[in-house]
Image (tube, helix red, strand yellow):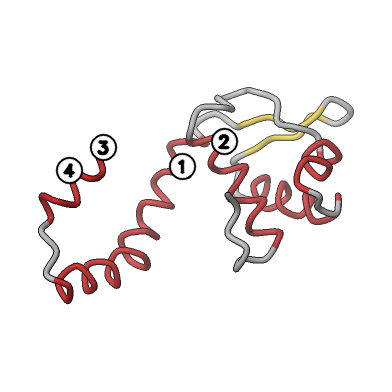
Amino acid sequence: MLDQSKPVYQRLRDVIAAGILDGDYGDGDMLPSVRALAAEYGANPLTVAKAYQSFQDEGLITVKRGVGMFVAAGAADQLRTRLRAEFLTQVWPPVADQIRRLDIDVRELLERADA
């Protein structure tokens, strides 16, 4: 499910990143074309191209003119490192505060995560 509170460009980045992190697209794998991804998500092709361009700028995907876009070597590790740091500095602190505020047992959280 896409987070509707984010701009379309960021939602598409999240979709692409999830595909790389989940192993749907491994190192060297071809990514869906701009038009295919735009059609699948009902997005403007220019918005999809912007999302892909941002990954290219970060060195996470490579483009072979006339062929397509491919996952760069080590892209999953680079993404995981960056997203882990963002999670620990931006997402986790307010979650940890809420856990303390509500006096939630961390063991209960772990049990629910395994369910």
Q: Residue at x 53, y 41 (%)?
A: 18
Q: Which residue is mark 1?
A: 78
Q: Residue at x 81, y 45 (%)?
A: 38
68 up-or-down from 85: above or below: above
**In this view of the protein, which residue sits in the foreground, 113 or 69?**
113
For marks 4 and 1 on the same chain, the one whose residue lies earlier in the sequence: 1
Residue 73, position as x, y percentages in the image: 54, 29
Residue 97, position as x, y percentages in the image: 22, 73
Q: Judging from the image, what secondary structure is the residue with disc 2 in?
A: helix
Q: Is 54 left, or right, of 113 in this rendering?
A: right
Instruction: Say which of marks 4 and 1 sits in front.
Output: 4
Q: Amino acid at mark 4?
A: Glu
Q: Judging from the image, what secondary structure is the residue with disc 3 in?
A: loop
Q: Which residue is mark 4?
A: 111
- Numbered mark located on residue 115 in the image: 3
Q: Judging from the image, what secondary structure is the residue with disc 1 in?
A: helix
